[in-house]
Image: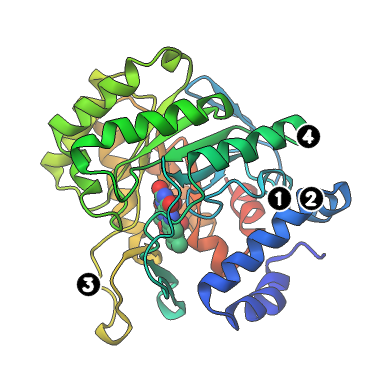
Amino acid sequence: MKSDRGTYERLVRPLLFSLDAEAAHHVTIRLLGRASRFDLGLRLLRPFQPKAKPTTVFGLTFPNPIGLAAGLDKNGMALPAWAALGFGFIEIGTVTAKAQPGNPKPRIFRLPEQQALINRLGFNNDGANAIAQRLRVLRDSGRWPVVPVGINIGKSRVTPLEQSKDDYLYSFRMLRDFADYITLNISSPNTPGLRELQEPEKLSELLHAIGNEAGTAAKPLVVKISPDLSPAELTAVLGICEENGVSGIIATNTTLDHSTIPPQLNQEGGLSGAPLRDRSTALVREIAAQCKIPVIASGGVFDAQSACEKFHAGAQLIQLYTGLVYHGPRLLREVMDNL
Ligand SMILES: Cc1cc2nc3c(=O)[nH]c(=O)nc-3n(C[C@H](O)[C@H](O)[C@H](O)COP(=O)(O)O)c2cc1C
């Protein structure tokens, strides 16, 4: 495999884009899952690896600051492959306490002109028990990746909002042993009510519940926030995160602001990619100005420049999703060569 951006865009992307977006996603995960089981498979992915640039954030050492964003490998199917491609860290999930199918299909939409995606998947995932078991098998096989692994957890759809802390706690207990850090996703727009967990009282309650768990102190806790928070809401969220010793903030999840999308292309769901770039960078800058909690930037990283913007705004780490769909794993090296 030739490791240039052209190969992906000329050969692989047209094939993937000839399929429905979710089918293309399944094919990719299946191939990377297979590659994860064989040394040869992993070796074929290594030409994409960028140069190392180790950095230490919340006590963890990252070989480079570019991570895989949550949602691409929700079920933890291909951890060795992501590491072989050169990601400096991998975030799996969102995992919920109960396995769930997510929303009716179709539920992922490409907007190539806008370099964007809209998704309303709704946390389709195998559930905390099955994913813990998969991770245990991987660990026992000796193929666990050497890069930090984050596990992103969220609320099961059937669980009422008032009981959400028990739901998060269940997943936290099941998965913490496998995670270098745990992300609390309180910002997906596709689970009704979830974003209300960003309200001060509810967030405080959730962080207290997790913080009171034995062993929590040893595990960095990260909170993933929405780009649609008002300035006052953001300040309140940051205050509560600081009070509760949160280790990191991921800014941001997808947006419900679709004002840049032509009406005929619009779909219900969270918008990611280029249209999110400036909004999420603005939030990174605001967070860095207001508090000392390290920021992981996520939203509209497509090239070296959009990545540099995030670091200049104050991010310590960045994550990729939509940029990978459009530009492939060569994006990693492009970013690292220009940092
Ligand atoms: C298809 C899709 C599924 C996603 N699923 C999740 C998820 O399960 N949990 C989560 O925290 N974020 C999820 N995200 C959000 C991404 O992790 C990321 O924060 C967001 O897309 C912004 O980054 P980007 O512009 O680089 O895509 C998803 C994004 C997409 C496009």
Query: In the image, 152: left or right of 231?
Result: right
List x then y, in percent, for residue 90.
58, 42
Looking at the picture, which amino acid does disc 3 mark? Ser
Give SS at disc 2: helix
Give SS at disc 1: helix
Counting residues from the N terminus, which is met first, the one under dot 1 or under dot 4? 1
List x then y, in percent, for residue 331.
61, 58
Query: Please, is residue 241 above or below residue 326 in the view?
Result: above
Counting residues from the N terminus, which is met first, the one under dot 3 or under dot 2? 2
**Are the residues at dot 1 and dot 2 in contact (C-beta closer than 8 Å)?**
yes
Give SS at disc 4: helix
Marks 3 and 2, Cα distance to the nearest angstrom?
40 Å
Looking at the picture, which amino acid does disc 1 mark? Leu
Marks 3 and 1, Cα distance to the nearest angstrom?
35 Å
Query: In the image, 36: left or right of 292?
Result: right
Q: Quadrant of residue 79?
A: top right
Looking at the picture, which amino acid does disc 4 mark? Ser
Residue highlighted by disc 2 = 46
Looking at the picture, tell me which residue is in the foreground, 233 or 39: 39
Residue highlighted by disc 1 = 85
Residue highlighted by disc 4 = 141
Query: In the image, 228: left or right of 125?
Result: left
Marks 4 and 2, Cα distance to the nearest angstrom?
20 Å
